[in-house]
Image (cartoon, rainbow, N blue to C red):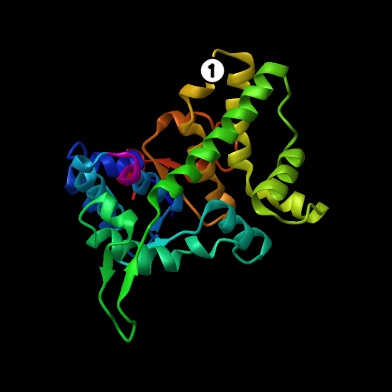
Amino acid sequence: MPANLSLIIIGVSDGHTPIDIWKGVLEKLAGRYNYCVSFTTFIEIVNALAGGDEDHFEQNRKRLLVLTAVVDSEFLPMPSQFVRASVLGLPSERPDFTPERLEELWMPALKQARDGKGLCLGKVVLPSFSGRPELTVRIDLPSLRKEVEDGKKLWAEQLTFAKKDGKEMPSVEGYAAFVLRFELHAPRTQRNVQQISKALDAAYCHLAHVHHQCTKGTYRVENNLQDWIDNQQLMYLADPNMIFVTADRRLIAKLNKSLDRDRVREFTEFATSI
């Protein structure tokens, strides 16, 4: 169960969502669902450490600790790498962002760091553990932030181009071929196109909704860059066993035409149903 937990976690961490509700949900998950930490949500919160001032370092880190404090939680790979593996059976192209690396190096460093500057400069030392030598860990937060910003920039450029030139939304097959080439770096065979078309139905329908708003309505791309993050999140539904939990009702409203709509659950509704 991946979760679009940015809004949920902020609410819990900052006291807007009662902690008892959150704990109650986690207790009910045991034995029924596996709690998965979305890479995209994780990076959103880590990026707040890179973009925020030092006065808010502890506040941002607290949000990260709430996100990852669930016993037996599972870190998910980057969305593109997740799709490569779960749909196409291909190995990861990004060893720097594997779930194992996030859990075994990133999280200990983020827990031990005292400020963002020290974290970026490589001043976080992890003690030796279970035969592993002492490690000095550096997380390049500015570069990580740039990678996310570059993704948003490309998304904005494509939508702006579509709006300016009146480009129609590509067919689901055309969309799948684009994803295979530019995100998955995989052969655009007929079989792969068919598999990706089915697996990314939610992401496609979300993009189609945004595309329609952009080309037919008053949608302003620069004010809605969060839509790129949301679209990345929806790629996890490529695994038919995944349930996506979010506090963002606007995101849910964009998925009315998706065959996977029932696997996207609003947090409050999900909390009362389990």
What residue lies at 64% left-to-right and 30% top-to-bottom? 158
Pick the front one: 138 or 62 = 138
Give above or below for 139 relative to 150. below
What residue lies at 32% left-to-right and 86% top-to-bottom? 131
Which stretch did the figure color magenta? 48-52
Is residue 233 inside the magenta stretch? Answer: no
Q: Is residue 190 something one can see in this rendering? A: yes
Residue 237, given in percent of the width and then of the height, sits at 55, 49
What residue lies at 39% left-to-right and 44% top-to-bottom? 44
Residue 139, given in percent of the width and then of the height, sits at 38, 57
Residue 32, given in percent of the width and then of the height, sits at 38, 61
What residue lies at 66% left-to-right and 65% top-to-bottom? 90
Residue labelled with disc 1 = 219
Q: Is residue 70 left or right of residue 217?
A: left
Residue farthest along the right direction in this orientation: 190
Q: Is residue 274 left or right of residue 235?
A: left
Is residue 49 inside the magenta stretch? Answer: yes
Give above or below for 24 relative to 152. below
Label the magenta part by its dominant secondary structure.
Answer: helix
